[in-house]
Amino acid sequence: MSPTVASRRLASLRALLSQSDAELRAQFPEYFLTYYTYLRIIRNPARIEHLFQKAHDMYRYLEAEGKDVLDLGAGFGLEALLVAIYGARRVVATEIDRDMVAVGAYLAEKVDPPVTHFESKYGDGIAMEFPSASFDGVMANCVISHVRSLEGFLMEANRLLKPGGIFFLSDENNSLYLPARPRRRRGWRGMEREPDGPYFTSRRAMIGEHFPGLSSNQLLEAVRRTRGLVGEEVEAGVRELLETGQVRRRAEFGYRDPRDGQYPERELNPFWLMRKFRDAGLEPELLPAFFSRAIEVHPRQWIKDCLRFFCERWPALSVYVWPILRIRGRKVR
Ligand SMILES: C[S@@+](CC[C@H](N)C(=O)[O-])C[C@H]1O[C@@H](n2cnc3c(N)ncnc32)[C@H](O)[C@@H]1O
């Protein structure tokens, strides 16, 4: 990939993200604007640069030059597109939301010159239709804390990798970064708020339908005692409650959608996650936190510089001082 072509593509992507809201609305679904406005990227040169540097870091950790890369749960596909622009041979971005898939394809065409070695496709990250050993690199950004089967997701990443290939993961739900914990937990509790938290409401409807004879107090008690249970477990839990006065079965995690088991977002301990990597045949390496260079994104540049200095020397320190965890795993079996 010639550096001039890459610079031209980056410049056109920068211009695209610097358009007015009205221009963006005319091309993208409303939540593209909401998402990137929330991330403060739209018309913000420093944040755009931050995103570019971050994607370059991923490209470097994936050792993606001239290689085939898959992005699982790519969202609008921007990071994956950047990995393609920096010099991967082919990048496939898969996403479960079809509107986002369409945005990814649009972005690749809109960039000048268009990125023809980038593909945006619909796909569930846990059961991809690609043959085994299709990719040299697989990446997943801010996805793993949402997926139902973390083990299934890692096994699938492993299956899709060629021997020696690299899985790069980053996620904002690092449980060892304590300042983020109260906000995250408030969010979970909101799902169970009585009487209108969405998980609470769903369970009440499910139980009401299966056990129409319950009094309103019994129903309330059953809904409270089955927190975190999913599908048939909820029914079994209520039966147990009616027969023995207790629910013995324990939920794996207290806040899940009772219909499909989806997590709002779960906290992940990076060291526990590294063990899961090993179980899935990926030799893990903890990577330093990401701090962009020479642009002011963090409110106090000197704090950022200091943290960078220490985190680059001792990556394990990163997980205590930064909300985002980054791990890569090399396929060993
Ligand atoms: C927080 S977004 C991150 C998007 C993108 N990777 C980024 O960093 O901007 C999480 C994305 O994962 C997608 N997702 C969740 N579960 C998935 C699955 N099983 N397969 C594919 N995508 C999934 C969601 O639709 C959502 O777009």
Image (spheres, rainbow, N blue to C red):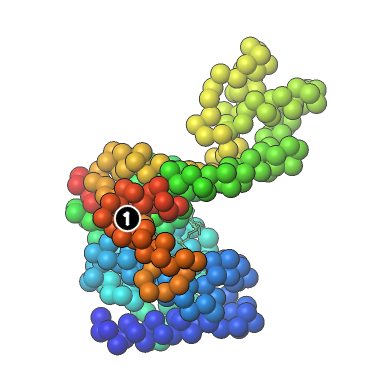
- Residue that mark 1 sits on: 311
Of residues 268 and 322, the one nearer the viewer is 322
Who's the residue at 69% across and 29% down the image?
Answer: 223
Of residues 53 and 210, the one nearer the viewer is 53
The image shows residue 131 at horizontal and vertical percentages of: 29, 55
The image shows residue 239 at horizontal and vertical percentages of: 64, 19
The image shows residue 205 at horizontal and vertical percentages of: 72, 36
Q: Give the quarter of the image for residue 120.
A: bottom left
Quarter occupied by the N terminus: bottom left
**What SS does tag 1 mark?**
helix
Of residues 101 and 284, the one nearer the viewer is 284
Q: Is residue 145 above or below residue 43?
A: above
The residue most toward the right is 216
Who's the residue at 59% across and 23% down the image?
Answer: 236
Who's the residue at 45% across and 72% down the image?
Answer: 296
Of residues 310 and 222, the one nearer the viewer is 310
Q: Counting other residues with Cα less than 10 Å from the Cα at mark 1, is it few (<14), some (14-19), or many (20 or more)? A: many
- In the image, 129: left or right of 65? right
| Label 1 CB less than 8 angstroms from ligand 1 | no
- In the image, 294: left or right of 193? left
The residue most toward the front is 302
Q: Is residue 288 above or below residue 230?
A: below
Q: Give the quarter of the image for residue 326.
A: bottom left
Quarter occupied by the C terminus: top left
Q: Is residue 31 above or below residue 282?
A: below
The image shows residue 85 at horizontal and vertical percentages of: 34, 76
Q: Give the quarter of the image for residue 305.
A: bottom left
Who's the residue at 41% across and 65% down the image?
Answer: 302
Residue 243 showing in the rendered view: yes
Q: Amino acid at mark 1?
A: Cys
Q: Is residue 301 above or below residue 201?
A: below
Residue 134 showing in the rendered view: no
